[in-house]
Image (cartoon, helix red, strand yellow):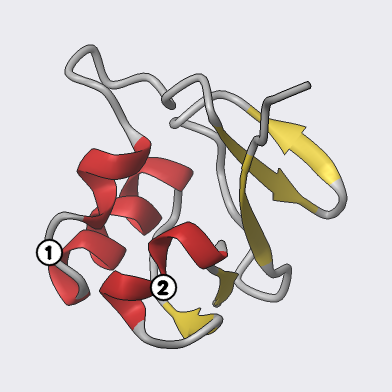
Amino acid sequence: MKVLIPSSLLSYTRRMWVEADGATLDALLRDLDRQYPGLRFRMVDEQDRLRPHMRVFIDARPVHDLGRPLDPAVPVHIVQALSGG
């Protein structure tokens, strides 16, 4: 499936859109990490939770559960939350 990579992680992929496989969000992130080592660690913490500054959207809806099943026809958008004032 197609995955949109945020600009902060382009140093890993060198491309804004990449292809990856996985029946769940966790499997997708593991496949991305296989292709682009170190990417998953930037998104998932040591307790296997999405890091607070990372957001994942599937079909324009936020996803927080790494066990969420995925539809290969629906793109996954990874976004880094920004803060500041």
Determine crowd level at label 2: few under 14, some 14-19, many 20+ residues with C-alpha closer than 10 A: few
Q: Quadrant of the C terminus?
A: top right
Amino acid carrying label 2: it is Leu
Q: Tell me the kind of residue under disc 1.
A: Pro
Which SS class for mark 2? helix
Q: From the image, state whether disc 2 or disc 1 is nearer to you.
A: 2
Task: Check the image and report above or below for 82 versus 17.
Answer: above
According to the picture, the residue beneath numbered tag 1 turns out to be 37
Vertical placement of 64 versus 9: above or below? above
Q: Quadrant of residue 3?
A: bottom right
- Residue that appears at 45% across and 46% down: 24
Residue 20: image x %, image y %?
A: 40, 75
Residue furthest out toward the top: 47
Name, please, the residue furthest toward the front. 85
The reply to whether the C-beta atoms of the residues labelled 2 and 1 are less than 8 Å apart is no
Which secondary structure, mark 1?
Answer: loop
Q: Answer with left or right where residue 22 lies relative to residue 6.
A: left
Assign the N terminus to one quadrant of the image.
bottom right
Q: Is residue 58 above or below residue 13?
A: above
At x 17% / y 18%, what residue is drawn?
A: 46
Q: Residue at x 37, y 39 (%)?
A: 43
First in sequence, mark 2 or 1: give its number: 2
Q: Nearer the viewer, residue 72 or 6?
A: 6
Task: Give whichever of 39, 27 is nearer the camera.
Answer: 39
* Of residues 60 and 16, the one drawn nearer to the viewer in this rendering: 16
Residue 39 % position (x, y): 26, 56
Residue denoted by label 2: 10
Mark number, residue 21: none
Spatial CA distance of label 2 from label 1 is: 12 Å
Residue count near mark 1 (Cα–Cα under 10 Å), binned few <14, some 14–19, many ≥20 = few
* Residue 81 falls left or right of residue 40: right
Which is more toward the observer, 10 or 17? Answer: 10
